[in-house]
Image (cartoon, rainbow, N blue to C red):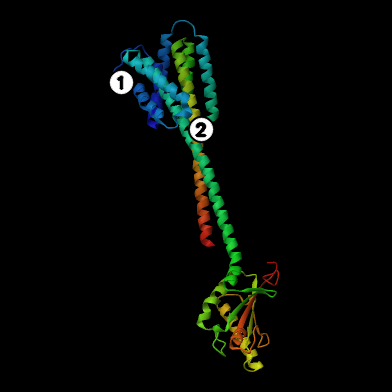
Amino acid sequence: MKRIASIVLTASIVAALGACATTPKGPIEELETARAIVPQVEASPRAGVAAENVSAARQSLERANKMATSGGKVDDIRYAAVVASRNAQIANEKILNVEAKEAVAKGEADRQTVILEARNREADQARERAASLEQELADMKAKKTDRGMVLTLGDVLFDTGKSKLKPSAYATIDRLASTLKESSGRKVQIEGHTDSVGSDELNQVLSQQRADSVAAALMERGVPSAQISASGKGEGFPVASNDTAGGRQQNRRVEMIFTDDASRVASDGT
Amino acid sequence: MGNPIVRRIAVIAGSSALLLLTACGSVSELTKQQVARSETAVTQAQAAVGSSEAGAIELQQAKETLSQAQNAIQTKDETQAQRLAAVAELDAQLAIAKSQSAASRKAADDVLASIETLKREADRSAVTK
């Protein structure tokens, strides 16, 4: 289009030179140009936005063509051809303008979509982080009590009479550690409990050691010690009867009570 | 043909040819109106194009053609005056259309660029979180 434009631009000067030549020596450049570019804009699917210019271009081109076949004056043919080309060029720019404006409108809409998506994603991430501890605890069957969310780790985590965590406990501890690290405001109280078998003193020591060993495992996984406290409760807080094997198994346990800074008890208000 | 010197010589040659012709009769009111319309169009094109690149060549062309039309009035060449004025008006309209479409194109490019920036930022923050 640039090349065509520069050719057409010179046409009016040629017209100004206008002598009285009536016999064209070979093809008339302006007419050739008009014949090339007028059909181009006519073929555009958006030609309607510049209907006046397109129709003026067509009329002038037809006038020029008619004069060319009937041996009209070269000057007249040139003038009609230049008018045709100019109108076609103007139409072309109007079409480009409308297309660009449509691109702007579409771009604005796309931009809003991108912004909205980013905002939603951020909100989702924030919600996920906030919900993750609650979710983890729920998944692990923590119970809401008036002391907070209480998660009971059964005695399967420890061998009888031992305070060393069994490897089978690692998956649970890993999950708790990662969720605690994400919720730095949360604190966990770890309490060790035993059944009534054995002496009070021994049970007190064992319950403390088991609580300590869970606390140590959390700290090893990067949970700050400030979030953790551990205590041994001995055999004094049974949750079931110590008269049956099943009851005793329930009493041998480590309880983890989750609180937060604001309410002390995580389940408050829920 | 795009050479400005060649063009200028052509303009001078054309004007002197017209002066030699010194056609007959007086210039009609209709032709004077056409020239006045072209003057208005050139003024509008000047305002629309301003100092920007798009449409500048066409504006310059419009001014030159208008000046030829005004010369043709002086020499009472009715047909030339009318035609040159009409072409000058079209040149001016083309200058305006070009500056408008260039401005819209730029706005479209800016929007697309801002979307790219937003997407890159969103991707980066999604990775860091």
Mark 2 = which residue?
B100
Residue B55 can be seen in this image = no
Amino acid type indicated by mark 1: Pro
Mark 1 = which residue?
A27
Distance from disc 2 to disc 1, alpha carbons, whole Å, reads 34 Å
Location of residue A26 by image quarter:
top left
Residue A178 can be seen in this image = yes
Q: Is residue A104 above or below residue A156?
A: above
Q: Position of residue A199 (x, y in %)?
A: 64, 94
Q: Farthest residue in the left direction?
A: A26
Residue A20 appears left or right of A144: left
At x 35%, y 21%, the residue is A31
Q: Residues within 10 Å of mark 1 (few under 14, many from 20)?
A: few
At x 48%, y 17%, the residue is B85
Q: What element carries label 2?
A: helix
Q: What element carries label 1?
A: loop
